[in-house]
Image (cartoon, rainbow, N blue to C red):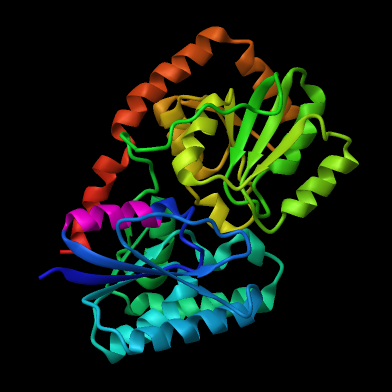
Amino acid sequence: MKKKLFVAVTNDISTDYRVHKVCSYLLQKDYQIDVFGRVLPNTISVNRDYTIIRKKHFFNHNFLFYAEFNTRLFFYLLFKKYDCILANDLDTLPACFFISKLKKTPLVYDSHELFSEGPELQGRKFVQKFWRKLEDFFLPKIKNSYTVSQSIADFYHKKYNNNMGVIRNIPLKNQVYLSEEITFPTKHKTILYQGVLNPGRGIKPMIEALMYLENIDLIIIGYGKVEEDLKQFVKEKKMENRVFFLGRISREKLVNYTKKATLGMVLEEPLGLSFQYSLPNKLFDYIHAEIPIIAGNLKEISKIIKEYKVGVIAENYAPKTIATVIQDLLSDKKKLLEIQQNQQKASEVLCWEIEQKKLDIYFN
């Protein structure tokens, strides 16, 4: 008989590539999987080989959302039977934890980031203290947990002695996607940002860096909290003809856009330990797409850049510094070729086909 796995996320699932990869691997291990998320105003339909349950919420922001989500989640699980629960990130953990104790169901925790130290929480002492207290309560009690980078795992182990594992968020080497001809709204070379539009992603410094560059524009793919703020910033800087927002694009089609870009940016800023220790999946997406990377000098990101020689690092976030790094790279044809050759080699090692096998420790 198949084991039944319940997976909880607070997003709408459609663009959560990590959760999709985990579920797809566990389907091969003969699990029956239900993924529980929510409906958002811009939710897109998806077709998966596992069951997707999405609930529309009365509240979509702040404390009221998290309270509503966990209440709904608790009562949903209360009347269901599963062999294992996978909680993704701290905001799904309260309901999953208490149900796992109440019903004696094994719980696995996947920490996609150092949640309580995220950039959105910096300067919000009361809110940050709340999330830290939740981590203090739950994380020492969870036996099976893993996260996305070694630095985050080390941080949690030092604090809670919880032996958290590491499963990086990297793409399938042989990923299936919907191939289609696409065009960018510019004839110039392009720098690509793809991902969530939240604070601290280095997008504003990059927009200002364009003022020192010619014949290269910025493409932004994604959505998030600072989207309207970024659009207003572009207007203020009179950069509407240099910065293009393409909105939300499904994961199945995104590869077409990634491959078309000239350069990929991973300019996360050190706004809290979560970003300092982050290892964004777009870093690996760019490697697999063979587009050279412009990166900030953060610990985990720069380690990959230097070890595999797949891009260049801006030592600070001054627009002129970023522009100089880009200019130097684009004028060095030999280096561009070497980076792309290195990316071909790196993608053989930095791939989900290898990384996914680490899941066997947690799900058997």
- At x 10% / y 71%, what residue is drawn? 1
Indicate whether 17 appears above or below 87: above
* Residue 312 forms part of the magenta stretch: no
Identify the main secondary structure in magenta: helix
Percent x, y for residue 335?
52, 13
Q: Quadrant of residue 126?
A: bottom right
Residue 205 visible, this orientation: yes
Percent x, y for residue 278?
50, 50
- At x 19% / y 57%, what residue is drawn? 360
The quarter in which the C terminus is drawn is: bottom left
- At x 44% / y 55%, what residue is drawn? 46
In the rendered image, the residue lying farthest to the left is 1
Q: Quadrant of residue 332?
A: top right
Query: As rendered, which of 225 and 213 lies closer to the eye?
Result: 225
Query: As rendered, which of 352 and 78 lies closer to the eye?
Result: 78
Q: Which residues are magenta?
A: 19-29
Indicate whether 248 appears above or below 63: above
* Residue 28 forms part of the magenta stretch: yes
Q: Is 190 situated left or right of 155 in this image?
A: right
Indicate whether 87 appears above or below 354: below
Query: As rendered, which of 315 and 114 lies closer to the eye?
Result: 114
Percent x, y for residue 226?
72, 55
In the rendered image, the residue lying farthest to the top is 334
